[in-house]
Image (tube, rainbow, N blue to C red):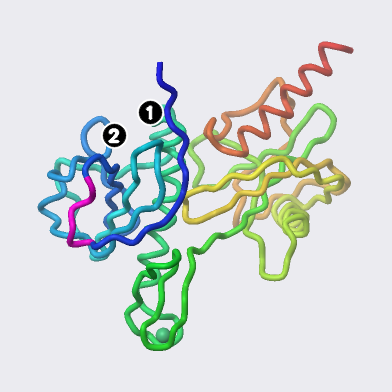
Amino acid sequence: MIAAPDFAPDYALLDPAEAPARGALVFPFIGQKLLLGPDAALPFPRMLQELGPPGRAFCFGALGEQRCVLQIWLADLAIPPHLSIGDYRALWGQWPVGHLAAFVRARQLAAWVLHNRHCGVCGQVMNLCRAEIACECPACGYKAYPRISPVAIGLVCKGDEILLARSPHFAPGMYSALAGFVEAGESAEDCLRREIREEAGIEIRNLRYFDSQSWPYPHSLMLGFIADYHGGELIAQESEIEDLGWFRFDDLPALPHPGSLARRMIEAIRAAWAGKTRRS
Ligand SMILES: [Zn+2]
């Protein structure tokens, strides 16, 4: 069996009027929406003909020998009836991991191109640079690079329990670790301490970095930490949190997606707890 290739990011500007090279994997986006053909596969170029040429096109990486090409239609066109919109969470388990990594980069770059059609300084229409991945203003020279938004996410432990919470937009019954966007001028650790204080009313200590993960909604870089409970009573922030509580490792609610950093942190801590419980 041939292993599925890893995704390797790169960048090369293409002429949107020209058909992509034969064998290229085309990721077509209307705005931020990835178009998929039958069976959640990337559509063949002929399935996109009715859309006309895309507004922007560039190579954004490779999967083994295959170049990955992003095509973006900037106008809010109707989705052709034989195509559907790809959702990262739904593709997990259907697509190889390398293809999912390509999707994460493609969707973030599609959002970046869409949001930088005009210069933020002088309002001119921006062009994609040839030399580097940037949108450049031909009038004033301002460059906009792909935006990445750091998010601190923390799993708080207290004895045999972890702190989990649910936000009103989660799937029914699902709980996850608390998280929040890093503010300007803030460290990831300060952000996590502040978020947990605001959303759960408690103090944490002993923060340990776990891992990071790029997430395509909208352009997040999740920075994962494990932390210990330090003090205070749980009080859920009404505007953000529907419910929260301490959950025992052997009695956890529905958990987030297996591909998410939150889930990996929960599983790692649960496995360590189970090992300790077996030994004692
Ligand atoms: Zn400008």
The verdict on residue 20 being magenta is: yes
| Nearer to me, 180 or 82 | 82
The residue where tag 1 is placed is 94
Q: Does mark 1's beta carbon lie closer than 8 Å to ligand 1?
A: no
* Residue 86 occupies quadrant: top left
Label 2 crowd (10 A; few <14 / some 14-19 / many >=20): some
Q: Amino acid at mark 2?
A: Ala
Q: What secondary structure characterizes most of the magenta part?
A: loop
Quarter of the image where the C terminus is located = top right
Residue 110 placement, left or right of 219: left
Asked if residue 43 is positioned above or below residue 247 in the image, the reply reads below
Q: Does mark 2's beta carbon lie closer than 8 Å to ligand 1?
A: no
x and y percentages locating residue 110 in the rendered image: 37, 58
Residue at 28 percent across and 43 percent down: it is 24
| Residue 40, numbered circle | 2
x and y percentages locating residue 160 in the rendered image: 81, 27
Provide the residue span drawn in magenta: 16-21
Residue at 39 percent across and 71 percent down: it is 116
Quarter of the image where the N terminus is located = top left
Residue most extreme to the left: 50
Label 2 SS? helix
Quadrant hosting ligand 1 = bottom left
